[in-house]
Amino acid sequence: MNALLRSFRPELVPAISGARVVLRAPVVADYEAWADLRSASRAFLTPWEPTWPPDDLTRASFRRRLRRYAHDAREDLGYAFLVFRRADEALVGGITVSNVRRGVTQSCSIGYWMGVSHSGKGYMTDAVRALLPWLFDGLNLHRVEAATLPGNGPSQALLLRVGFSKEGYARQYLKIDGQWRDHVLYGMVAGDPRR
């Protein structure tokens, strides 16, 4: 196994429990469940995500992804979680914590995806709720940010439901499905009530 993966310390990305889900760092053994769920959900996810590379669902690509996650966690740049349904340990989605910034800002951004067959069932709401205490109390961050496409009503509702505030509009903020797209920005600070 690659030295980068061998040197990864799991305590940097703990398992986090929610009411109905468990979040944990992805491992090599997750490849098949991850590839199957992403493949079955491709049409559902494509409008909301960056363009998938041609080899995105291959085992080699997944291993590269794990190496990047391990590097980012070791350097305190970002953290990746897969989201599993507690009842049967089925993979339902994922959350990434990116752009961790230290110094005067103490902030990060979150992004998430949900498999099409699990969408609209409250799993991601539970996952984001479970993640927030670790971000604020475990990582000692002051601010958590998220961005959604203006037409993504379910994601906007999720963020408001867990306590984020709508903060503004960013022109051509992220490149989604091959095009620079405007986004609605949301934020939460450590003292905000969590719902």
Image (cartoon, helix red, strand yellow):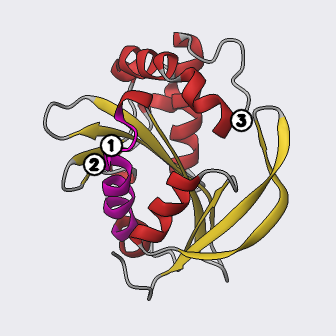
Is 161 left, or right, of 106 in this rendering? left
CA separation in Å, label 3 and label 2 = 27 Å
For the residue pair 94 and 2, the one nearer the viewer reads as 94
Vertical comparison of 32 with 105: above or below: above
Q: Which residue is mark 2?
A: 15
Residue extending furthest bottom? 191
The amino acid at mark 2 is: Ala
For the residue pair 36 and 73, the one nearer the viewer reads as 36
Vertical comparison of 158 with 68: above or below: below
> Residue at (56%, 52%) from the top-left corner?
78
Is 23 left, or right, of 71 in this rendering? left
The amino acid at mark 3 is: Pro
Structural crowding at the residue carrying mark 1, measured as other residues with C-alpha within 10 Å and reported as few (<14), some (14–19) or many (≥20)? many
Which quadrant is the N terminus positioned in? top left
Name the element at disc 1: strand
Is 156 left, or right, of 175 in this rendering? left
Q: Position of residue 173 (x, y in %)?
A: 81, 56
Q: Position of residue 120 (x, y in %)?
A: 38, 44
Name the element at disc 3: loop
Q: Is residue 83 visible?
A: yes
Q: Which residue is mark 1?
A: 24
Is 130 left, or right, of 186 in this rendering? left
The amino acid at mark 1 is: Arg
Structural crowding at the residue carrying mark 2, measured as other residues with C-alpha within 10 Å and reported as few (<14), some (14–19) or many (≥20)? some
Q: Position of residue 188 (x, y in %)?
A: 52, 77
Vertical comparison of 20 with 55: above or below: below
Q: Which residue is mark 3?
A: 50
Span highlighted in magenta in the image? 118-133
CA separation in Å, label 1 and label 2 = 4 Å
Query: Closer to the N terminus: mark 3 or mark 1?
Result: 1
* Residue 124 lies within the magenta run: yes
Query: Closer to the N terminus: mark 3 or mark 2?
Result: 2
